Image: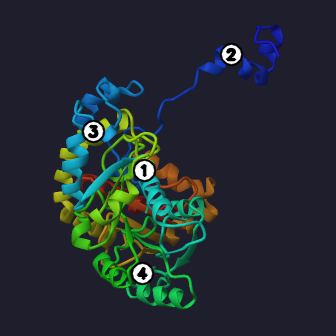
């Protein structure tokens, strides 16, 4: 095939698309920028102005490596060393913390270090898919605790005790347990302290998956009494990402953060170096803002409950998950919108369109029967605007 322009190019659009010049022009404008975004995945990753102001200096690849002497968490200019070895351990209640490229990478590095291929692990039934994928990559077998039926979908803490016993009897005692805190479907917050106590008594190390907690709400590994914690920078710490944090107690830090035999500055599970540029700068730049918002968590829960109370006044909308709710991630069953979709000319897409027309986005296009959303970081005025929009849309015939 030739890239030379011929008359044919202009007649056949498929050939024009293969023209080198056109091919290089990719439209990267973000369609929904500036709208109120209800996507739980994105609300905690919105970058505050003070962070935006610094990012331009760090866009280049490997930008944080100007003064690196071989180890990311030892870099002093910018002050990554203090951040990783003092600020974050204090914030998370850990003895040691390392930077990862996301919560999943943290989970994988722990599983890969602590377990052998073929080992069993125990996780809660509301666990995120990335927990399953991390375990699969590490060659592990998975057992799950039960959960209560709809609409609550609650994890009973004591099921960790009975499951561990059951697995032990079957000759497959879990090498590791994981609690999703909160889960990403319903925003349920089990009693992590209770699960940690059960796991401690059974001598099963426990990971707290705090992808939706670290950077949103107060959370402290020592207080919980578990062994590991993972967090997600792009999900809940106002960072551009991809970036995450992994924390461990003294007991495990040496193993999980062990250095390479051949390269004594390089962590093996970190593959030598993790976040090497813009993403760690964004995490550090947002940190003072994150500290402030974590202190404001009660207000966030109050806002979420207010939203839930108002929205469930609409006939045909029901809250799913624990009630009263304790997190900004909320799920709803919304039969009223489903009913409208059955006769609407835009079918299931009407809801997305109607919300967008009112300056709101973040509910997946096509969904009407049930969906999750988050009010994290929104003002009361914005929340009232969203409630008003849902009330209006519910009246569409
Ligand atoms: C989003 C999410 C993850 C994945 O986080 P990454 O930082 O993108 O790896 C893991 N667990 C839960 C519960 C999540 O909601």
x and y, in percent, of residue 370 in the image: 51, 67
Mark 4 and mark 2: span between their CA atoms?
Answer: 54 Å
Element marked by disc 4: loop
Q: In terms of sequence position, does the residue under pointer 4 or pointer 2 come before the other?
A: 2
Q: Residue at x 28, y 70 (%)?
A: 305
Can you identify the residue that label 4 sits on? 154
x and y, in percent, of residue 162 in the image: 45, 90
Nearer to me, 156 or 224: 224
Element marked by disc 3: helix
Nearer to me, 84 or 44: 84
Instruction: Estimate how packed mark 4 is, as few (under 14), some (14 to 19) or many (20 or more) residues with alpha carbons within 10 Å.
Output: many
Can you tell which of label 3 and label 4 is closer to the viewer?
Answer: 3
Task: Describe residue 246's horizontal placement relative to residue 139 as left or right.
Answer: left
Can you identify the residue that label 2 sits on? 20
In this figure, what is the number of numbered marks? 4
Is ligand 1 less than 8 Å from the beta carbon at label 4?
no
Instruction: Estimate how packed mark 1 is, as few (under 14), some (14 to 19) or many (20 or more) residues with alpha carbons within 10 Å.
Output: many
Q: In terms of sequence position, does the residue under pointer 2 or pointer 3 come before the other?
A: 2
Element marked by disc 2: helix
Can you tell which of label 3 and label 1 is closer to the viewer?
Answer: 3
Q: In terms of sequence position, does the residue under pointer 3 or pointer 1 come before the other?
A: 3
Kindly give the residue lying farthest to the front in the view shown.
Answer: 261
Q: In terms of sequence position, does the residue under pointer 2 or pointer 1 come before the other?
A: 2
Mark 2 and mark 1: span between their CA atoms?
Answer: 35 Å
Can you identify the residue that label 3 sits on? 74
């Amino acid at each position: 095939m030739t890239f030379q322009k011929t008359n044919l190019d202009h007649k056949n659009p498929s050939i024009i698309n293969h023209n080198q010049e056109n091919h290089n022009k990719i439209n990267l404008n973000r369609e929904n920028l500036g709208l109120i975004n209800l996507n739980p995945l994105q609300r905690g990753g919105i970058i505050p102005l003070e962070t935006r102001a610094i990012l331009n200096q760090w866009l280049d690849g490997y930008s944080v490596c100007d003064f690196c002497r071989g180890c990311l968490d030892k870099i002093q200019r910018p002050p990554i060393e203090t951040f990783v070895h003092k600020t974050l351990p204090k914030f998370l209640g850990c003895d040691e913390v390392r930077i990862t490229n996301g919560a999943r990478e943290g989970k994988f590095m722990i599983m890969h270090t602590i377990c052998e291929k073929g080992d069993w692990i125990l996780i809660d039934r509301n666990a995120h898919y990335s927990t399953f994928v991390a375990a699969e990559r590490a060659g592990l077998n998975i057992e799950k605790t039960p959960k209560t039926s709809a609409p609550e979908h609650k994890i009973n803490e004591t099921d960790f005790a009975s499951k561990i016993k059951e697995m032990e009897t079957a000759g497959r005692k879990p090498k590791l347990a994981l609690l999703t805190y909160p889960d990403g479907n319903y925003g349920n917050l089990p009693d992590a302290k209770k699960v940690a106590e059960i796991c401690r008594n059974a001598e099963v190390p426990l990971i707290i998956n705090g992808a939706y907690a670290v950077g949103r709400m107060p959370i402290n590994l020592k207080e919980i009494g578990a062994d590991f914690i993972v967090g997600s920078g792009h999900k809940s710490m106002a960072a551009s990402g991809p970036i995450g944090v992994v924390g461990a107690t003294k007991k495990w830090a040496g193993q999980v953060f062990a250095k390479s035999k051949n390269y004594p500055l390089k962590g093996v599970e970190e593959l030598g170096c993790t976040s090497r540029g813009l993403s760690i700068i964004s995490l550090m730049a947002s940190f003072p803002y994150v500290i402030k918002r974590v202190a404001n968590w009660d207000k966030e829960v109050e806002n979420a409950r207010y939203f839930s109370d108002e929205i469930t006044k609409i006939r045909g909308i029901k809250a799913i998950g624990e009630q009263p709710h304790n997190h900004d991630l909320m799920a709803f069953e919304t039969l009223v919108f489903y009913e409208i979709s059955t006769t609407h000319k835009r079918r299931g897409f009407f809801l997305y369109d109607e919300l967008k027309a009112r300056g709101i986005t973040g509910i997946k296009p096509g969904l009407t029967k049930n969906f999750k959303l988050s009010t994290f970081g929104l003002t009361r005025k914005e929340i009232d605007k969203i409630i008003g929009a849902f009330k209006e849309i519910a009246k569409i015939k």
